[in-house]
Image (cartoon, coloured by chain):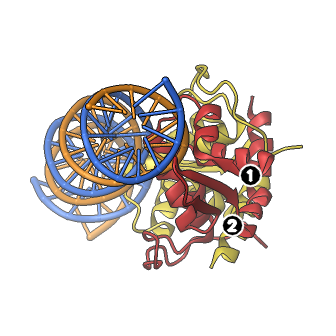
Chain colours: A red, B yellow, C orange, D blue
Amino acid sequence: MTFETNEGNDATVPGHKKHNNPTEVTLEVIGGKWKTAILCLLAEQGALRNGEMLRQLTPITQKMLTQQLKELEADALILRTAYLEVPPKVVYELTDRGRTLRMVLDPLCEWGKRFV
Amino acid sequence: MTFETNEGNDATVPGHKKHNNPTEVTLEVIGGKWKTAILCLLAEQGALRNGEMLRQLTPITQKMLTQQLKELEADALILRTAYLEVPPKVVYELTDRGRTLRMVLDPLCEWGKRFV
DNA sequence: CTTCAACGTACCCGATTGGTAACTATATTA
DNA sequence: TAATATAGTTACCAATCGGGTACGTTGAAG
């Protein structure tokens, strides 16, 4: 019996805004402008560096990319690894939790294709 | 192999903004503040009147409800039927297309519950 | 001594969203 | 005559979101 009602809406979730409701929590987590694109990229290509993502997501800007990545990291969906080199090298990859998002991103994509 | 890349992003979709990408199309359609709540309600309870939804979705406002319903109707996810009576009576219910959203709302809700 | 690479941050701006409050229409009821 | 119920609409406002530009850091290369 999924597809449930949204009772008790606002009730402060620690790191997040309001939304106590499961569906809205998920939407909030993947809802950013470039987030699904980023997640798909990492799901397909494994670990990627900042510059690589910048190229593949054009016309995203550095600022937007960093911002979205930060939020995804805060939600433990991706892992950021910074190597102490110069010039800097930073690699991003999905966490286990991030990989579980397939379960929601796949249907999202499927439905979108049928919407025509 | 779902979980695909977002190539060719902006390319004017008729009634919608840009987003040619399936995943983002879906997100745009269900992304409004109260939309998932409304869709769940209709999925559970069948046809509902404006006032009934207003009560069950408190603290939604009349303006927001109307607005979200209008958008859902424009996307052919719900059907609006206005009876020519006084006082007015308007009933909303899911369309077939609206019902197919289960396929995406269920996983969304499931994942949200596990996110803790 | 200047420039470049790679990855950010800081500051500012306009557009979109969500929300509040007041107003409309009309037949029925008190 | 005035209030009630129902389903809106309208004007206005504040917060958030996405985006643009400029600047910072550090060592190596020219």
Q: Nearer the viewer, residue B29 or A14?
A: A14
The image shows residue C29, relative to residue B68, as above or below, that is below
The tag on residue A105 is 1
Q: In terms of depth relative to the viewer, which is nearer, B63 or A97?
A: A97
* Residue neighbourhood size for the residue with mark 1, other residues' Cα within 10 Å, grouped as few (<14), some (14–19), many (≥20): many
Q: Is D3 on the left-hand or right-hand side of C4?
A: left
Please identify the residue farthest to the right as the structure is shown: B1
Residue C22 location in percent, x, y?
14, 50
SS class of the residue under badge 2? helix
Task: Residue B78: give x, y in percent of width and height.
Answer: 64, 44
What residue do we see at 79% from left, 59% from top?
A: A103
Q: Position of residue C6 (x, y in %)?
A: 55, 42
- In this rendering, the count of numbered labels is 2
The quarter in which the C terminus of chain B is drawn is bottom right
The image's mark for residue A1 is: none
Q: Nearer the viewer, residue B23 or A4?
A: B23
Q: Are marks 2 and 1 on the same chain?
A: no
Q: Amino acid at mark 1?
A: Leu
Q: Which residue is mark 2?
A: B109
**Residue at image coords 73%, 48%:** A108
For the point 70% across and 76% down, which residue is it?
A: B114
Residues packed near mark 2 inside 10 Å, few (<14), some (14 to 19) or many (20 plus): many
